[in-house]
Amino acid sequence: MSEVREKDSPGEPEGFLGRMFQAFRYRDFRLLWLGAFTSTTGTWMQLVAQSWLVYELTGSAFYLGLVGFMGQLPHLLFSLLGGAFADRIDRRRMLLLSQYTQMATAFVLTALVLLDVVTIWHFLVLVFVIGVAQAFGGPAYQALIPGLVNREDVPNAIALNSIQFNLARVAGPLLARAALDALGAAFCFLVNGLSFLAVIATLYMIRATFTPQKTTQSVVQQIGQGLTYVREQGALWQLTLLGFVSTFCGVPLVTLLPALSEEFFGLGASGYSRMMAISGAGAVTGALLYALISRMERRALFTLGSQLAFALILGLFSFSRNIWLSSLLLFLGGICLMGVFASITSLVQLATVEEMRGRVMSIFYLSFRGGMPLGDLTAGILAARLSLTAALQFLSVTLALTAGSFLIFGKKVRRL
């Protein structure tokens, strides 16, 4: 195997901003970051418009959860396969195919809305197709990032990558709010389709490549090898479990925001978009803070502490009916949850060898992303049968019990 990447030799970071933005000193990382930010902004515009349109069509929190479940289900079905291919072929080619597929689905959705023929079943099918593309592209993207920077800057690159995602969570909903009011949902879907051109262009421009070793193993054998590696690497499987619980309990808060904003606070589409932006702003702040301390030791204790803090915030949010207090809780929750995500991902990346990276990240990606549809579906069912308050409280207790258990019994994780 050979890995080719630009060596900027940036040296030790100097000063506050130098430590925070160290990975930006690598050309390939800068290019990929800019392309991904543009595309992710479009994706968040689509997600906001999609969630609001689904709720408008059905008036049901259950269907919000079901659409979220169908969009994430392919990650459960195909992520391991995507990881094996990420260690067998050029990761950039996999990413390009993923981006072209997602761009096509955005244009199809635009046409359906413009023709006024869109139904809930269209959403269920199209989000599933998007999920398939992401299941193959996700492990390749995660495995590509460490090849763009030096090893000691991998946690910083992960944090800055989280920043682009969450800056898009701020920009996307704000743009979607204006677009929904002035131009309608179809415009959001169209902009998302066009935004994929940015990340496609940067993938052609970056110089870093991955050339896999020749192998006689089948895809199934390589998947098995990856599972064995994770199982034998001590704390890796425990980190994978923590990733699953974090997304299972954390992501439904965002998924259910259309229903929460209307039932708790009587807000319309613009109010919902504003709350999405507040949550995204908290996540950006959390990613910036993690970038600043990305070379810290004992990341696992930081992770578990952040999980407990988020569990408390989630419980408080379930009781609050004050828009200002709830907005503050959303912001703080974004900070905590992003610290959890960035820390766990950094620990997994640093514990992995390059030739296994695609498969290991696909296993983590499967668990991390797999928690989303199951959490969305569970929260949607609880909200429909009991209440939104009961759904949030269940998620809060589950996360607190998990983090507490690892703090008490998880010796291997606590030492990381």
Image (cartoon, helix red, strand yellow):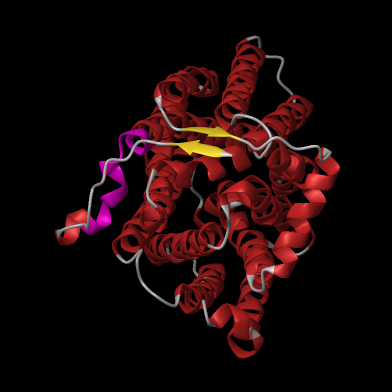
Q: Could you tell me residue 48's position as x and y percent?
A: 53, 36
- How many marks overall? 0
| Left or right: 406 as drawn, with respect to 48 | right
Q: Could you tell me residue 45's position as x and y percent?
A: 48, 32
Please determine whether, in this image, residue 185 is positioned above or below residue 245. above
Question: Residue sitting at 34 percent across and 66 percent down?
Answer: 295
Question: Residue sitting at 62 percent across and 68 percent down?
Answer: 239
Report the predominant secondary structure element of the magenta stretch.
helix
Most extreme residue toward the bottom is 408
Q: Could you tell me residue 372's position as x and y percent?
A: 67, 52
Please determine whether, in this image, residue 380 is positioned above or below residue 148. below
Please determine whether, in this image, residue 283 is positioned above or below residue 78. below
Task: Look at the image and give the residue range highlighted in magenta.
Answer: 19-30
| Left or right: 32 as drawn, with respect to 351 | left
Name the one closer to the observer, 309 or 153: 153
Is 208 magenta? The answer is: no
User: Which quarter of the figure has residue 69?
Assistant: top right
Please determine whether, in this image, residue 239 is positioned above or below residue 183. below
Confirm whether residue 59 shows in the render. no
Confirm whether residue 185 shows in the render. yes
Q: Could you tell me residue 196's position as x and y percent?
A: 49, 22
Q: In which quarter of the image is the N terminus?
A: top right
| Left or right: 345 as drawn, with respect to 115 | left
Name the one closer to the observer, 119 or 45: 45
Question: Residue sitting at 37 percent across and 49 percent down?
Answer: 160
Name the one closer to the observer, 39 or 219: 219
